[in-house]
Structures are given as C-alpha cells and as structure tokens.
Image (cartoon, rainbow, N blue to C red):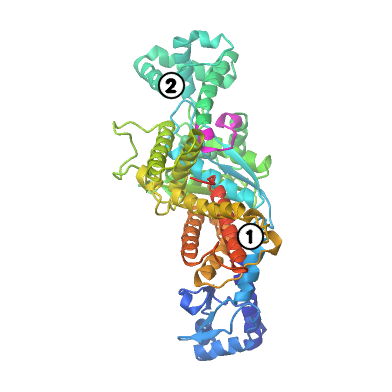
Amino acid sequence: MNPTQELLQGKFQQALAAAFGDEYGTVDPLLGAASNPKFGDYQSNVSLPLAKKIGQQPRAIASAIVEKLDVSDICEPPEIAGPGFINLRLKTAYLEGQINAMQGDSRLGVPLTDNPQREIVDFSSPNIAKEMHVGHLRSTIIGDSIARILEFRGHDVLRLNHVGDWGTQFGMLITYLREVYPEALTTANALDIGDLVSFYKKAKQRFDADEAFQETARQEVVRLQAGAEDTIHAWKLLCEQSRQEFQVIYDLLDINLQERGESFYNPFLPAVVADLETSGLLEANQGANVVFLEGFTNREGEPLPLIIQKSDGGYNYATTDLAALRYRIREDKAKRIVYITDSGQASHFAGVFQVARRAGWIPDEVELVHVPFGLVLGEDGKKFKTRSGDTVRLRDLLDEAVSRARADLETRLQSEEREETPEFVANVAQVVGISAVKYADLSQNRTSNYKFSFDNMLSLKGNTAPYMLYAYVRTQGIARTVRSAPTPSGNIDFTQLGADAKITLQDETEFTLAKHLLQLGEVIGAVETELLPHRLCDYLYQLSDKFNKFYENCPVLKSEEPMRTSRLALCDVTARTLKLGLSLLGIRVLERM
Ligand code: ARG
C-alpha cells in the first residue's frame, strides 16, 4: 500500500468509528485505486457489505461515512456514486507536495525497510564441467535483480552461488583427466583443456565403454571423499577451469555473487543424517535411508520418500540442500532464503523444506521461498536450440545480442548521418545488447515460459530495454540543452535543480505522470514481498509511456518561467526514477545512444 492510501485508510477508519461506533474502527474500508480516472484516484466500496450488516441502504451508509470523513487536506470533497461507492480525487496541492518531496529525496521517496534482515538469494548455481544453460541464465538475471531490490531496501543480502561442484561424476572426470593430461596433475600450472563441456562428453563415452575405467572412477570417488591429495588437486583444477568459464558470463552480465558450492557443505552431511535419525524421521527403505514425505504420494497412493543417504552410503542433492539450509540458518543467521531455479525443481524444494521443518530446524520467523521460473523457448515455441539443433552456449548468445545491437546502431547512425567514435559504438552496443537480454527475461511474469527472440528484445518499440533506455536518453538530451543554454538567471543545472525547483501541475499529462511516479515505492515494496520483477518492468514501461505523452503535450524548454523550471524538475524526477528502476533490474543507462 502506498503512503497516501495508508493515510486515507486511517481517515476512513476514524470516520467509520465516528459514524457507527468504535467497533467499526477496524473495519477494512476496501479502498483501492479507482478503476477509471474519470471517477477520481481512489474508491471505497465499504458501504455495500456494511449496508447488509447494519441493515440500511448502501447510499445512506456512504453519506454517513462521508459526513464524518475528514480528508480535506488530501482530497477534493468526496463523491458518492452508483449504488454507494465513495470516490476520492486527490487535491492538486497535495500531489504537488508529494512530487516535490520525491524530487528532493535522493531515494525518490522509497524508504529503507523498517525491518532490515539477513536475506540469502541462492541463484545462478551452474554445475562444474557442465554447460551453463539458458535456465542458469534466467536464474542469474532474476536472482541478481531480486538481490538488488532487497539491497536497495536496506536488507543485508548474501548472494550465494550454490555451484554443483561435488558428486560421483568427478570420479569419471578425474580418471579421464589422469588418462589424457597426466602432466596437468604434476605441474602447478592452471589446466588448459579447452572446452570443458566436450571434455565431459568424451569422459562419459570412455566411462560407458570400459568397465575397468568405471572401476577406477569409483575408486576416485572414494579417494575424493577421503580427501586424497592428488585427487583433490585434480578436482580443484576442474573446478577452476569451469569457474573461469562462468566468470566470463558474470562479467558480461555485470553480476556479483559469492561462490559457495555443494562441496562446502560436505563436512556437515553426516550431522544431517544423525539429526534426522535422532528426531525419528529417518527410515530404512530398500537399503537407503529416507524420510517419507507427508502429502506427496506416487500413483499407487504410497508416500514418496526423500532419499537422504543412498544404499552405497553416498548422499544426494537434497541432503546437501538440507545441510545448506541448516548452515544458512545457524551460521549465516538468514531470516529469509530464496532459491531461484526453474519450476522443475519445485517438488525438490517442497520436500527439502518439509523435512527441515519436521526436523525442527526452521525457527518460526524464518521464511523459505522457492522462486520458480518457466522455460526459455525458441521462436518456434519449442525447446531453445541453435539452428543445427545444439544447445545454445550462453557466451554465443550474449555475443550475438551485442553484435545485433551494434548492427542496428550502425544502420541508425548511417541514416541519421551521425558520426560517432568506435568507443561510443562499442559501449552502446554492449549496453543495449546485454540490457535487451536481461529485460526480455525480467519483463515476463517469471512463472510462465517465454520465447527468446532477438528481434523483439532489440526493438525500439514496445516493452523492451531499448525503448526504456531511449526514454532516459531523451531526458538527458533535455538536460544537455539546459546546460548549454542556461536561463537568464544562469544557474539552472538539470542535475541540480534541487531546493528552489518547485513542480506545479497544470496539464492532464503532468498529473498522470506525477501520480505514476508516486507509485514507485509501492511497486518496489510489492516486488520485495512477491519477488516478481516484471512488476517493476511494467511500472517503468508505463512510466516511459506517460513521460512521452507529457513530452509531446507540454513544451518544456520553450515554456515560460516558472513552468519551465517546474517541467524540468518533472523531467528530472522521471529520469532519476528510470535510472534507479533500471539499475534495480541490473541495467545501466546511457546518456546518448
Ligand atoms: N545446480 C543446480 C542446477 O543446475 C541448481 C542449484 C540451485 N540451488 C540449490 N540450493 N539447490 O539445477
């Protein structure tokens, strides 16, 4: 709820108490944004349910409320409409006060949270020696944006990369490494085996074809678990190689996160088993140790087991997540943990959360959230693939976005007969290309699948990054003009309009823009609780649109004072809101493009 709505809510409750008695002072006044701006800004529907309860006509109830309602410093006189709706229109002076306060605030009116807490965002989390695929790309982009929003609100955020760096596949990989690069294990040099993914494929072929190899691989797993020095050395080499490949992607995307892979929790796995044993949850099942889940059954209606320890003594993905959960609560003191993965892992997390709860590891105030997302599809609506049918390498995908952005830019420069330096072209192409990929992902409701289309995401029209970046560029163009041709008073710098710049609202488009700007805090608050970044994208898209309408309708530089300064200040709040909003999506703005 935004501050204005909160204020009005309080006023309504006072009126309800005054009109019908104190016990009505806590009734929800059912206040919402008006469905149609013709009727004002807010509407209360409370008269209808109250009418039933009290046994009077709704319109009579509405008049009784309005009679006691003291909102004269916020709204025009309330109007009763239809069967008994109460419509409210904000006063111009009130709106001006709010928008001027926003303009004067470096946080644009978005408060720091009253309840700062340790929050963990578990995101990206690719697997060593395997492809970092589009699913990991989604997790990386969505997780980064969520982390940025929580940080901006003042939470203490731990960004964790739960890399898959442990497991039986390392037996196979290390055995193969010893076979084909024996020298790598004896020198101190970093490993250079080229493409790790094809290395993995070759190792797998070798593994599948040769029983003796399989046996050696099994022994390597045992050695790895026992911490044998040379095996650990080989394992580290493989992790390091993957890490470098992942880092290329993180650098391109400007992502900051802390690696804490599955191996980190390895020492804590036996305690997980012991604890589940003590709490009586662990049961033997076909040689394995499992916990039977409540509310999850197979087709035969039998309860589903979550496997904690396999019959060979090995542990599972879920066991590691249980250990991680305990560690994050006990050591990291997390109050909320959010996991960003594809929806396919929903039942994994539901199982892990349930077992941890039943084991009594989750204090009441701790919240565990799986943040699922849908698939990335090709333009044909099928699984996202290259033309030749291979999985798309992220590196290639990002490079292509940038080179297409560059081609678009070069065409535009040519048609506008503009000359720009190679540095300018490279920078704009980089920012536009990467932003387009990020924004295309974030602007979708994450729970649905989305179609990956370079043409759509790079378009200058529609709900795209280039459109949004362009709106910002427009504001900066105005700022440059102001700087190069100061007003007679000589001292207006768009970036420092500051204290003496007062916004006065005149035109309808100015009202619309100001009201929209004032919803920023509410939108950010909603993303913080619902973890749905597309809501911020929608907000910014509408903001760009409302700004463009204002700019088409209202002369800015050519209007007389004091409107000129007022409108410049409105441009300034818009620009800063766009810049802040985009930065929370992990998108850098451009001064020119
Ligand atoms: N490595 C996993 C994968 O690629 C994702 C890990 C997600 N995080 C977690 N704590 N399980 O599917």
* Residue at figure coordinates x 41%, y 13% from the top left: 213
- For discs 2 and 1, the disc positioned in front in the rendered view: 1
Of the residues shown, which amino acid type is indicated by label 2?
Asp
Image coords of residue 240 (percent x, y): 55, 23
Q: Which residue is mark 1?
A: 487
Q: Nearer the viewer, residue 286 or 328?
A: 328
Instruction: Please state the horizontal and vertical placement of residue 46, each as a whole percent of the image.
Output: 53, 80
Start-end of magenta stretch? 249-265
Residue type pointed to by label 1? Thr
Disc number placed over residue 258 in the picture, else none: none
Q: Secondary structure at mark 1?
A: loop
As displayed, is residue 102 above or below residue 277? below
**Sequence-wise, which precedes: disc 2 or disc 1?**
2
Based on the displayed image, in which of its 4 quarters is residue 273 positioned? Answer: top right
Residues 147 and 593: in front is 593
Residue 89 seen in this snapshot: yes
Taking the image as shown, residue 225 lies to the left or right of residue 411, namely right
Q: Mark 2 sits on what residue?
A: 195
